Amino acid sequence: MGLARVRRTRIDQLVDEGNKAAKLVQTHLEDPDRFISACQLGITLATLALGAAGEASFADKLAAMFEHWGALAAWSPEVLHFARLFCFGFSFVITAFCQTVFGELIPKTWTFQRAESVLFLIIYPMEWWCWVASPFIIVLNGTTEFILRRMNVVEPPRRHFVHSEEELKMLVSASHEEGVLEPEEEEMLHSVFDFSDTVASEIMTPRTDMTCVSANSTVRQFVDLALEKGHSRIPIYETDMDSIFGAVHIRDGLRAMVERKESSQVRELARKVLIVPENKNLGDLLTEFKKTKTHMAIVVDEYGGTRGMATFEDLLEELVGDIADEHEVVEEFIVEEADGTIMLDAKLSLYEANDKLNLGIDDEEFNTLGGHVFGALGREPSPGDEVKTDDYTLRIEESDRHRIIKLRLIRHPQTEGTDTNGNKIDLPPSKPNAAKSLEAS
């Protein structure tokens, strides 16, 4: 247990500092099979010895005591036989109790709480025992592996103490519950785990919200647009947004203005951008950003049409949360109104909606709340249209033709029912069933 509980990074640090005991521990961490087999062999031999010697000796002495009392009290042979059976049973219980408490529970609890201290305390005796018992350990491990191979059981990896991603997530959550990690630290660590499972289409700025400039525009027009929108980079296209071939940086535009080239076409300042599919995971996208030294990627669908735009800042925000500078207007996606309803931006992702509002939406076709509502309606949305579940209503407050902009979340009050005596009781609302439980009104 000490080998499983000790922190590998701490042992590596002590080895670098010249700690000899830590070096032995590190050796057993690299190949724990030998250490575990030695421990199991020692535990088994100690248990057998205690049972064979201790139990028999204790039972014999106790039986002799009962026989002496029986002779004085003139017990019958049947009573004496029962007394002997009782002695052996009682000695077995006492031996098992002592073995469990002093040989199992106390050492393991102590090791669980102070793994490093206990491991350093017993590492030298254990190293000696591993050397003494090495012939038996070789035979035991060899026999075990032979039987497992005959059973077509795949040999387990040597690194027994490497945690899976799900186990690490559980450790992070447990550390937060114990107060070791702050809520922000827990959220950031979970974001790291989810980073490579997220794809570009989930974090991109959608096509409808992109600001682009024609390649035939002048430098002056580009600079004016960049200053108006507050963007440092703007994608540049040939004929339409499906023909984006690069991006222009405001720094290059201002430099051209200083050089009196404000009438030049902005295509001369174009820089390369990445073109990536919508299912590109963020881990690979980050690698490409670093490799190509670019900060912008155009996300395209399977037909080559532009779906949106992802930037290096979008990736960073996926890890650390929203980042807003002094010139950026912070957009509130969730605003609680005085009447108890909640105003929602239709661009709110379904993941955030479920996480922060507990909506229980399961929709694999759409990524945003607006897209989900649009799909549930099945027609062009209009202000006042509603999508209902048993627990809440999503009402469209603002739209632009087929694009939903704002939604209002209206929670339903708990339904009222009666018990067997006819008294009114509050029934909890039923759990949402996403698209199947939605009905357009």
Image (cartoon, rainbow, N blue to C red):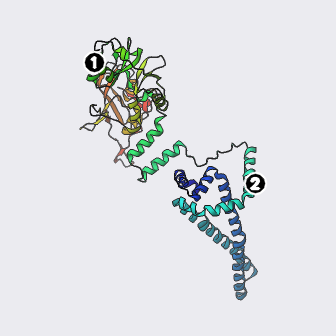
Q: In the figure, is residue 263 to the left or right of 58?
A: left
Badge nearest the viewer, 1 or 2: 1
Residue 21: x and y in percent read 58, 59
The mark nearer the N terminus, 1 or 2, is 2
Residue 227: x and y in percent read 26, 23
Q: In the figure, is residue 43 to the left or right of 320?
A: right
Disc 2 secondary structure class: helix
Disc 1 secondary structure class: helix
Residue 26: x and y in percent read 59, 53
Residue at left 46%, top 50%? Answer: 174
**What is the crowding at mark 2: few (fewer than 14 residues within 10 Å), some, or many (at least 20)?**
few
Residue of label 2: 139
Residue at left 54%, top 63%? Answer: 110
Amino acid type assigned to the residue bearing label 1 in the image? Met
Residue 6: name its quadrant. bottom right
Residue 257 tag number: 1
Residue at left 70%, top 64%? Answer: 45
Residue 408: name its quadrant. top left
- Residue 115, relative to residue 264: is it above or below? below
Amino acid type assigned to the residue bearing label 2 in the image? Val
| 420 or 130, nearer to the observer | 130
Residue at left 76%, top 80%? Answer: 77
